[in-house]
Amino acid sequence: MRTVAILGSTGSIGKTTLEVISSYPDRYRVVALTANRSADALLDQVERFQPELAVLADGSPPNGGPAGTRLAAGWDAVLEAAAHRDAEIVVNGLVGAAGLEPSLLALQGGKRLALANKESLVVGGPLVMQALEEGGGELIPVDSEHSAVFQCLEGATRESVRRVVLTASGGPFRDRDPLDLSGVTPDEALRHPTWDMGAKITIDSATLVNKALEVVEAHFLFGLEYDQVAVVIHPQSIVHSLVEFRDGSVLAQLGYPTMALPVLYALGYPERVEVDAPSLDLAEIGSLEFEPVPDGRFPAFDLGRAAALRGGTAPAVFNAASEEAVAAFLQERLRFTGIPEVIHGVLDAHAVEDVTELEGVRRVDRWARETARARVDEIGNQAPRSK
């Protein structure tokens, strides 16, 4: 039986992970859970899964819970969960750059890190890869696209790879006139056509910020140059990614759009655990469509790729600016089209540094957020209101 700590257990990835674990009680046992503010949801999970440690990051320790569970609060307790001595696997389902330090602790402790927090690699990729090498742990991606690439690369050498192709649904506004997007409301942007995800990642999918982050993630995870990471629009979200090898052959991983499968793969690797799910019916699907990302259609994606090529702290600044811009949009303080405006302004003001230590990353992250908030205040007074 493998022991698991779940960071962000009340979020989308966390809840999916617990659903998967509940289907395999003889394989997995939960030893730690963390949530941000959802105390009631966390207590419900504690009652069901009986972890040794449960943490509320923002607030006081929740009241109640079984006698065998220690209830704690605060960021230090989240870090304790990430490094929990009894956890063999740490699922990092946290949102945003806050996930970096827990990822480092898990890897430094020699654990398997099932990584859904792509920002860990975007913000501190060199630090994560160093922790992986020095700590002797494992890094298994949970993002569906990177899980697909990971699976396609089984048994292959990195030298045999010509390129990888990440797929993107295109979000809810793929076919909408770009001139019509300034009036988009949060409610509209949160209606993703194929995936059921948290609010931040759903907005990032609409702007393709998410795909820009995934390009950086693939660069670090698989040791690829940026010109070896391509992106195509695939509205059906059935093909999750493809790998083209130097002999011209291409492998792809297909499946219905559910995060349960990459979560189960990360927990069970290298074994493929049997799952009670319908087989993929290609005849019923009928056709699979692919198209290039239109030039200029997704300006935030273009900014993200440019930041990746600049390297150093530029991806961290891109990420922090996008997080602040999305938060302002969801709070109806910024237009949808203001998201790339904010990102562009912050990146333009940044002098790139090398990523060498955690405190330097934190300092740059703080600067980028402060600069982004100021930019929001400058341009964000015309945001449309949800009905």
Image (spheres, rainbow, N blue to C red):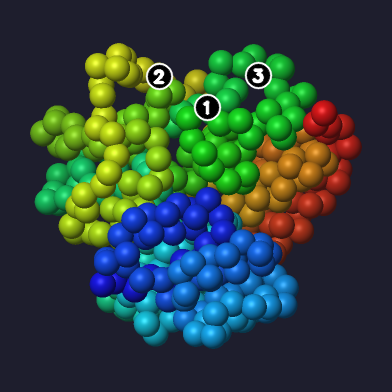
Q: From the viewer's perspective, is residue 146 above or below residue 257?
A: below
In this rendering, position of residue 239 left or right of residue 52: left
Residue position for label 2: 291
The CA span between labels 1 and 2 is 17 Å
Where residue 359 appears, as percent x and y from the top left, is 59, 75
Q: Amino acid at mark 2?
A: Glu
Residue at 58% over, 25% down: 172
For label 2, count other residues whose C-alpha is less than 10 Å away and answer few (under 14), some (14-19) or many (20+): few
Determine contact: label 1, label 3, CB under 8 Å.
no
Q: Is residue 26 left or right of residue 309?
A: left
Q: Position of residue 135 (x, y in %)?
A: 32, 78
Label 3 Cα neighbours within 10 Å, binned few <14 / some 14-19 / many ≥20: few
Kind of residue indicated by mark 3: Pro
Residue hosting label 3: 178
Position of residue 279 relative to residue 18, above or below, is above
Q: Is residue 222 visible?
A: no
Residue at point 59%, 33% (across, down): 207
At a point 72% along the width and 35% down the height, the residue shown is 186
Residue at 71% in and 17% down: 180
Q: Nearer the viewer, residue 285 or 275?
A: 275
* Mark 1 or mark 2, whichever is nearer to me: 1
Q: CA distance from mark 3 to mark 2?
A: 17 Å
Q: Name the residue nearer the viewer: 370 or 193.
A: 193
Q: Amino acid at mark 1?
A: Pro
Residue 94 seen anywhere in this rendered image of the structure? yes
Q: How many marks?
A: 3
Q: Secondary structure at mark 2?
A: strand
